[in-house]
Amino acid sequence: MSLVRLNIKGISYSQTQNGAYALILNEVDGDRKLPIVIGAFEAQSIAIALEKEIRPPRPLTHDLFKNFADRFDIVVKQVIIHKLVDGVFYSSLICERDKIEEIIDARTSDAIALALRFQAPIFTYKNILDKAGIYLKVNPKKEDEDEQDSILVDDLLADELELNAPKENYKSKTLEELHKMLDEAVANEDYEKAAHIRDEISKR
């Protein structure tokens, strides 16, 4: 499968939901965008790395990782967004130490925060871009491109909320069943479902 290089266009925020952000990636040799919903902490970390002039007084988690890697001569060579399942992007860090290459699984938001710090290129596979990439429709009434991006984020979040809405009635489950379901949700990295189950356990 052929790889497509992506650039970071920036981070857009939701006009309707506080703390909701999307990372907007651009296809280097094309017009498609790949929007990825991320959390507030990751958005802050990526924004700080993009700005360059902003230096936190103490290292953030991704800065700590970079400092640790530098100390032990580990280099992140590139990031590959390699899988898309149920709206969740999966990524890999391609690292190198002593000319030995290693592949490390990572959340896409973390992988991109690190790619910025290592100045590593970001890639995805063509089939993922074909599936999730979008052409941003230009609305003549919206002259500000950032405003169009924030509307795009709202659309994305609406889709994600619909996709991740709890489909099960957890009230009918026993505490033992809920704890087992919680473990399974965490193991599958379905943190949205895990949050709904945790809320039900807390109510008990």
Image (tube, rainbow, N blue to C red):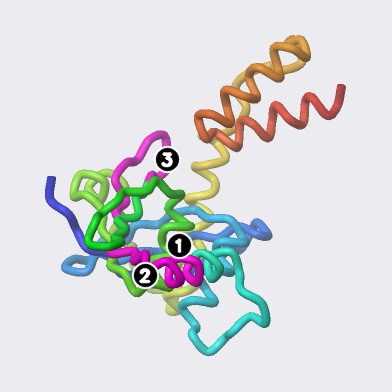
Looking at the rendering, in which quadrant would you find the C terminus?
top right
Q: Residues within 10 Å of mark 1 (few under 14, many from 20)?
A: many
The numbered disc on residue 23 is 1
* Residue 126, position as x, y percentages in the image: 18, 50
Q: Which residues are magenta?
A: 66-90
Label 2 sits on residue: 8
* Residue 133, position as x, y percentages in the image: 29, 53
The numbered disc on residue 60 is none
- Callout 2 secondary element: strand
The residues tagged by marks 2 and 1 sit, at their Cα atoms, a distance apart of 8 Å
* Residue 200, position as x, y percentages in the image: 77, 25
| Tag 2 and tag 1, C-beta contact below 8 Å | yes
Label 3 sits on residue: 87
Left or right, 87 with reference to 102: right
Can you name the residue that lies furthest to the bottom here? 53
- Callout 1 secondary element: strand
